[in-house]
Image: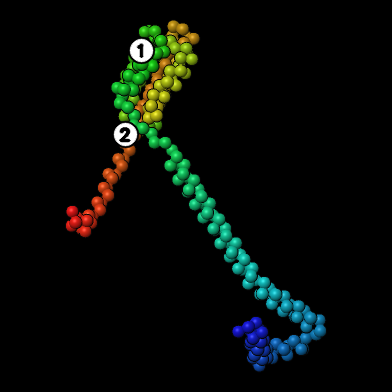
Amino acid sequence: MNLDDLKDKLVSDARVTWERIQESGTYNQLRDRYENMSPSMQKVTLVGGAALIAFVILSIPYRYYSQSQEYVGEFEGKRMTIRELLKVSRESSDIPQIPQAPSMDMIRSSVENQIKNANLLPEQIKGTEVADNNSKVIPKNLTEGLLQVSLAKLNLRQVLDLGYQFQTINPSVKLKDMVMTANREDARYFDVVYKLVALAVPAAPEPPPEVPAPRGKKNRNNSGGE
């Protein structure tokens, strides 16, 4: 069916529909009322009818336009959510794995070596002590233990340098607390207690064992000729 045939069919269907409307009683009643109206009322009725028809015609595409806008907004929201999820996934994969903390004896030995390298006087070294973690900030089941380092008569530079060195022993060893008070004999110096906590980092899962590749079957023809 070409365009001319389609046009003729639409015109024919419209003519048949109009004839049916003209034969209906409702149409005849409305026509009689319209003819009995004054010319000004007839004009108002025509304008109102035209406006009503235009409103009905325009409301259809507007409704589809509103629905399309809602669909676009929903699509944009889901796309942003997916982007945020992908961003979080990439950031989580880029976070380096924290190694397991060394034993408390190894941490204690490292701290004592750093104190020795700091060239402190014997009277400045009060000692180190391994204790249980009783902090409310880090639960006890998430730590391997706590090392308390007590030093005396430190200047401010020594306080900062030793704190930094203790913090860099291992990524799983953190400086949980530092108590600093002025020395009683000389207020220019400080007595400091460092509290280092070793995090209980779970061991990384072992990679699954490699499955050996299946061996190829020998060629029977070659084996028969040997």
Q: Is residue 59 above or below residue 95?
A: below
**On the image, which quarter does residue 154 sit in?**
top left
Q: Please state which amino acid type lies under the numbered disc 2.
A: Asn
Q: Position of residue 7 (x, y in %)?
A: 66, 84
Seen from the viewer's position, the closer of residues 190 and 211 is: 211
Q: Is residue 166 above or below residue 140?
A: above
Instruction: State the residue position of label 1.
Output: 126
Q: Position of residue 133 (x, y in %)?
A: 33, 27
**Rounded to the nearest whole Å, what is the CA distance between mark 1 and mark 2?**
29 Å
Q: Position of residue 177 (x, y in %)?
A: 41, 24
Seen from the viewer's position, the closer of residues 72 and 218 is: 218
Q: Please state which amino acid type lies under the numbered disc 1.
A: Lys
Residue at 33 percent across and 22 percent down: it is 107
Instruction: State the residue position of label 2.
Output: 141
Q: Position of residue 205 (x, y in %)?
A: 31, 40
Q: Which residue extends farthest right?
A: 39
The quarter in which the N terminus is drawn is: bottom right
Q: Which residue extends farthest front?
A: 225
Question: Which circle marks residue 92 in the picture?
Answer: none
Sequence-earlier tag: 1 or 2: 1
Judge left or right: residue 125 versus residue 211: right
Residue at 64 percent across and 86 percent down: it is 5
